[in-house]
Amino acid sequence: ACLNWYRDLLHVRKYLLSKVQFHLCQALSDEVIHLQWKSAHDCFSIIVALEGPATVQDEAWKDMQAYGINEKDVVIGIAASGRTPYVLGGLQTAKKNNILTGCVVCNVDTIIGTACDYPVEVNTGPEFLTGSTRLKSGTAQKLVLNMITTTVMIQLGRVKGNKMVDMQLSNHKLVNRAVAMVMDEIKVTAEEA
């Protein structure tokens, strides 16, 4: 089963960061969490925003097929406006195929919110700079995604008390954290841990 972030390009950098952070801290393969967006130039689009493909509603299901998506998966659509055609199309088709759907949008009573099983509608109000949804909307969506990934880790049993377990010990900070956790849990010295 996978958790799929399903996103147009507008905020793809934030969700890529979420995926990277999630992967670094938890011992999960790339098969567990996907970030997906539509672009003719996928890698280039991380640096330079290419918005055109986000308007293609019926391309979404084709893109999801590359991951072998099925009814054991969850698709979460992310769109500040709550009306991005690509995200809407992906959610509608996923739902028709008995795949659990959710969304994170920054308006209430949106077409994307009504198209999914579990909408999260965070009413952030107008942006300080009109049209710059990377401000309030992007920040609010990132907070919600952090809550979702944390909840997933708890449900998968990768948290004990208030501590992450099953971490990838990929740097000194995480190694030190793991040693401290073992010391605290079984009351041993740092050398023994």
Image (cartoon, helix red, strand yellow):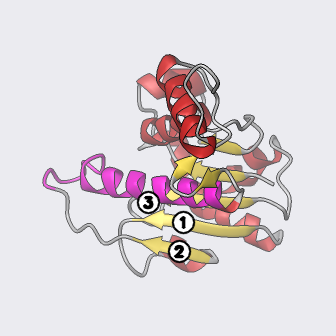
**Residue 150 painted magenta:** yes
Q: Residue 40: in sight, yes or no?
A: yes
Compare marks 1 and 2 and give the one earlier in the sequence. Answer: 1
Q: Secondary structure at mark 1?
A: strand
**Residue 17 painted magenta:** no
Compare marks 2 and 3 and give the one earlier in the sequence. Answer: 2
Query: In the rendered image of this protein, does residue 108 appear above or below residue 53?
Result: below
Distance of label 1 from label 2 (alpha carbons): 5 Å
Residues drawn in magenta: 128-154
Residue 107 % position (x, y): 35, 71
Q: Secondary structure at mark 2?
A: strand
Q: Residue type at mark 2: give it.
A: Pro
- The residue that label 3 is drawn on is 144
Residue drawn at (69%, 36%) of the image: 27
Q: Residue type at mark 3: give it.
A: Val
Q: Report whether 149 appears left or right of 100.
A: left
**Which part of the image, by quadrant, shows the N terminus?**
bottom right
Q: Are marks 3 and 1 in contact (CB under 8 Å)?
A: no
Compare marks 3 and 1 and give the one earlier in the sequence. Answer: 1
Q: Report whether 131 appears left or right of 33.
A: left
- The residue that label 2 is drawn on is 119
Q: Residue type at mark 1: give it.
A: Cys
Residue 34 % position (x, y): 67, 43
Front residue of 164/124: it is 164
- The residue that label 1 is drawn on is 103
Q: Report whether 160 appears left or right of 119.
A: right
Q: Are marks 1 and 2 in contact (CB under 8 Å)?
A: yes
**Which label lies toward us, 3 or 1?**
3
Residue 55 % position (x, y): 53, 51
